[in-house]
Image (spheres, coloured by chain):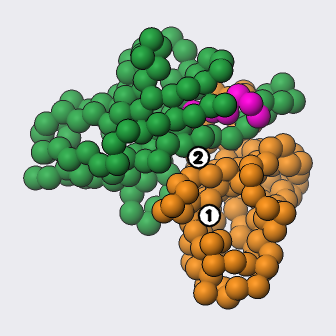
Amino acid sequence: KAGVTQTPRYLIKTRGQQVTLSCSPISGHRSVSWYQQTPGQGLQFLFEYFSETQRNKGNFPGRFSGRQFSNSRSEMNVSTLELGDSALYLCASSLAGGGLQETQYFGPGTRLLVL
Amino acid sequence: AQSVAQPEDQVNVAEGNPLTVKCTYSVSGNPYLFWYVQYPNRGLQFLLKYITGDNLVKGSYGFEAEFNKSQTSFHLKKPSALVSDSALYFCAVRDWGRMNYGGSQGNLIFGKGTKLSVKP
């Protein structure tokens, strides 16, 4: 079974631009979560989607948004990019049928560099 | 609020020796604890988790973790370290505060990570 895939793997943007990242979960998984990883802040939760609905959201500004499609694929958008948005963005999927004990499986990440 | 602490930024071990990567947690309910490993320029890989039951949890690649409720710890261990174990290790706990809809996945709260270096 294929793992979580993320595209693109690497991205370079300039300040003020916007960017869209894509995540395809493991087949059969219905929950997709997004995390930002930076050297200074570590791993931080962005948001989680289930059945095309955002169920949880972390403490990030409104410039960060996402959506989930009927096939469970998810996209994350960042508008008006800032230098501090440079990070590794990780997507994780889980079955979403059993609650907190379920394991999240991570994709390889998209490394975003904002110049 | 839930939190996780990894008190060591780096752990150095000689190949063949046992290794321990420390993790302590603070949760308001029952803890759901996880260990992940991250190799350079890669995503996170699941190692093991503690939900309930035996305090000693066995996971991937020969790793195990010991849950200690009285010390609120969940240390990762391996009897004999390999050079290939060198990586960044993260302890994580589920955020009960984000539980909703009777089964929300919520989010994972991660520790800062511990860099494990195994020398030949």
Read off the chain for label 1: A
Q: Nearer the viewer, residue A91 or A88?
A: A88
Q: Which mark is residue A16?
A: none
Q: Is residue A7 visible?
A: no
Q: Amino acid at mark 1?
A: Tyr
Chain ID, green in image: B
Q: Does mark 1 fall on the same chain as mark 2? A: yes
Q: What is the CA distance from the residue labelled 2 to the residue labelled 1?
A: 14 Å
Horizontal and vertical percent position of residue A58 = 74, 49
Q: Read off the residue under disc 1.
A: A89
Q: Which residues are magenta?
A: B93-98
Q: Secondary structure at mark 1?
A: strand
Foreground mark, 2 or 1? 1
- The x and y percentages for residue A14 are 67, 88
Q: Chain of mark 2?
A: A
Q: Residue at x 66, y 31 (%)?
A: B1
Visible residue check, residue A39: yes
Colour of chain A in the rendered structure image: orange
Q: Is residue B67 left or right of residue A55?
A: left
Please tell me whether residue B37 is drawn above or below residue A109 in the rendered image.
Answer: above
